Amino acid sequence: MKVLICDHPDCMMPDHTLEIETLKAGLGPDTDIEVYEYDEGRRDEFYARLADADALLTAFVTMDAEAMKHAPRLKVISLNSTGFDQVDLNAATMRGIGVCPVGEYCTWDVSESAIAYMSALNKHFKLYQKEIDERHAWNYAAAPQWPRLEDQVLGIVGFGKIGKCTAEKARGLVKKIIACDPHVPHGDFVARGVDRVEKDELLAQSDIIVNHMCLTDDNERYFDAAAFSQMVRRPIFINLGRGLCVDESALVEALEDGRVRAFGADVLYNETPDLASNELVGRDNVIITPHSAFYSTTAIEDLERLSCENIVHFLEGEKEKVFKLVNQV
């Protein structure tokens, strides 16, 4: 039995000891485990390594129908990520390949990052740091004067586990919390003292907007030119969901004409972005982190263990123990 651990070099875990130990403990010490750094320019090499794999562990390698044709033995794709838009679910289901995103491991960490972004952007930390580090200027008035968080309305788009956790952390920090999510029961909003609103209302009423949505067929470029034009309160905009939810060209225009006063992101439209040419990079009112909002000792341990246990349970015929199986196989 073979398990292939594969991802883009900058997305690979720094150490695979826990993954290997978990897989061998569950599948047996003779399990063949190969760790391979993916290169988009050598896709055929990836296909060759995939050809005899029973399981694939990845986060961001695209597994489309063509890739699955080269994987006749593949039974399960375990994702050490919460999203699964990089996998062709229909093709996987037709071939009887289970798809298992990790589901839950970093809710606390990402919501903690949302609060950090809110505070850092509202208090102009990046601009002040640049003033001090590069200009050696000690000037509080270098930044524009903005209201306290307690005087601002927070709008949360996507009220799943992470959105709810952010709302709970933000209670007491902001004046009011509103949220929109058509898939969440009304009682979940009421229980947390959050006003449920529609998208248009949220865009118009929020001083801070945080995106916590998963990517679906319906929300790619959810934040487009039309959405930014509705942000009449010139909000801070924070994207901790998926990069594809934001039209980056429209966002750049909104930043330049002041419709968005600051932007924070842990994801960009391209998962492996060309930062040297990205128009969002280098701005005093923009903070970008490299998809690291999840990153903590506890989260990494949970991520590695759960994603490998998903492989073990699936291959051992214990589908009911898989943390999250998103297709019917």
Image (spheres, rainbow, N blue to C red):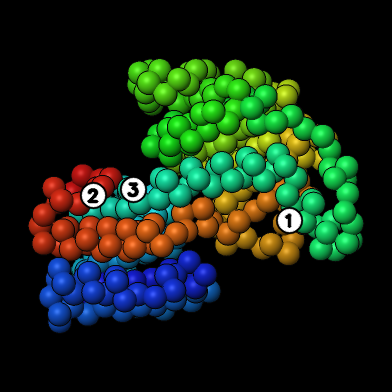
Task: Compare marks 3 and 2 and give the one earlier in the sequence.
Answer: 3
Nearer to the camera, 298 or 23:
298
Q: Is residue 81 left or right of residue 121?
A: left
* Image depth: mark 3 or mark 1 in front: 3
Task: Compare marks 3 and 1 and give the one earlier in the sequence.
Answer: 3
Dividing the picture into quadrants, the one containing residue 54 is bottom left
SS of the residue at dot 2?
loop
**CA neighbours of label 3 inside 10 A, class few (<14), some (14 to 19), many (20+):** some
Mark 3 vs mark 1, CA separation in Å: 30 Å
Compared with 319, 223 (above or below) is above
**CA neighbours of label 1 inside 10 A, class few (<14), some (14 to 19), many (20+):** few
Q: Amino acid at mark 3?
A: Glu
SS of the residue at dot 1?
loop
Q: Which mark is residue 323?
A: 2
Q: Which mark is residue 164?
A: none
- Going by the picture, which residue comes out furthest to the left? 317
Q: Is residue 204 left or right of residue 169?
A: right
Say if residue 251 shows up in the picture. no
- Give the image location of residue 260, x and y in percent: 74, 35
Q: Amino acid at mark 2?
A: Phe
User: Where does label 3 land, which residue?
Assistant: 104
Q: Is residue 137 left or right of residue 203?
A: right
User: Where does label 1 land, which residue?
Assistant: 281
- Give the image location of residue 273, x and y in percent: 62, 60
Compared with 134, 149 (above or below) is above
